[in-house]
Amino acid sequence: MNRMRRFGIASLALLCLLAGTGAEALGGKENTKELHIEEAFAGKEGTMVLKNLKNDKVYVYSKERSKERLTPESTFKVANALIGLETAAVRDEYEVKRWDGVEREFESWNRDHSLASAMRESAIWFYQDLARMIGDKKMNEYVSRIGYGNQDITGGIDSFWLDSSLRISAAEQADFIEKLVEEDLPFSQKNQKTVKRMMIQDEQDHFILHGKTGTRLSDMGLGWYIGFIETEKGTWVFAVNIDGSGTEAKNITLEVLKEKKILK
């Protein structure tokens, strides 16, 4: 009896673990297909989740890795911007914060920035200041409300997403972006539209690409690219991570989108 009970508890724990890492976002077997894109990763470990929102088809490279929680790095700026706007820690995408004069690793960071320009240039200092203005209580509340990864912000209000306590899987990232596309997150439609507009990286006649990179700057050993692409035939969400840089993750994404004839 005790053995059966222990087995039941262990099974429940496993189900909770799988649900918690975004396994449910991958859908059933009939709706999930394997991506054969090993060459795009050039021998490096990584994963890609690609979902067609028109028919809910999910395409995955390295399914096990897609459920592994890793630190979000600068991809958390998407959630940070949403929370900042919703809590009025920042007025709008145009509000400017003055540069503090501290020289940082990238020249593009060393100037005044708005919410939008800091997203575009991935200026960490701006979003660290924004997080401090939001504060622990509200940040914790919203990170929990949106179910963002392991929801752990104990690593410090201005650093928990940077190689620290907060972790999220690629499957969960894709699910988060899908909810943003559908404006189904616990934020006003206006704020969700604003952040989606801030994420635009390429706008052409036949598509609009929205994305955000993230790189673990301590060793350049983890890179992300998350976002979505709107085309004439529908919208696709994607989440890629690699044992490399965010630039590598973005290049892989663009290569696969072109290979699949989603990006033309």
Image (cartoon, grey):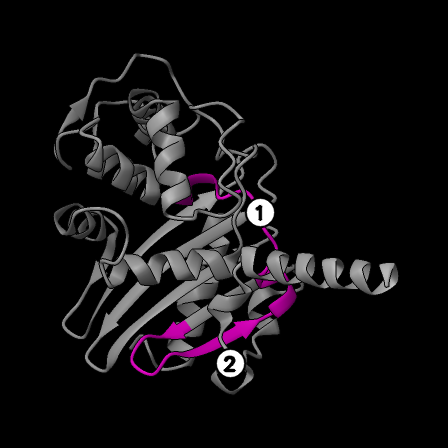
Q: Quadrant of the C terminus?
A: bottom left
> What residue is drawn where x is 33% and y is 55%?
211
- The stretch in magenta equals 51-75
Element under disc 1: loop
Residue closest to the far front: 1
User: For this view, does 91 lie left or right of residue 214?
Assistant: left
Quarter of image, res 83? top left
Specify whether 253 is left or right of 37.
left
Q: Residues within 10 Å of mark 1 (few under 14, many from 20)?
A: many
Q: Nearer the viewer, residue 206 or 61?
A: 61
In the drawing, does residue 203 fall left or right of residue 150? left
Q: For this rendering, which residue is in front, 246 or 190?
A: 190
Q: Position of residue 40 (x, y in %)?
A: 55, 69
Q: Amino acid at mark 2?
A: Thr
Q: Residue at x 36, y 13 (%)?
A: 102
Looking at the image, residue 53 lies above or below residue 43:
below
Decide: is 111 above or below 23.
above
Q: Which residue is mark 2?
A: 32
> Vertically, is 18 above or below 116?
below
Residue 187 colored magenta?
Answer: no
Q: Position of residue 5 (x, y in %)?
A: 79, 60
**Does the stretch in magenta take in 58?**
yes
The residue lying furthest to the bottom in this view is 30
The answer to which quarter of the image holds residue 231 is bottom left
Residue with the mark numbered 1:
70
Residue drawn at x 33%, y 63% is 178
Q: Which mark is residue 198?
A: none
Q: Which amino acid, by three-letter code, is at mark 1?
A: Leu
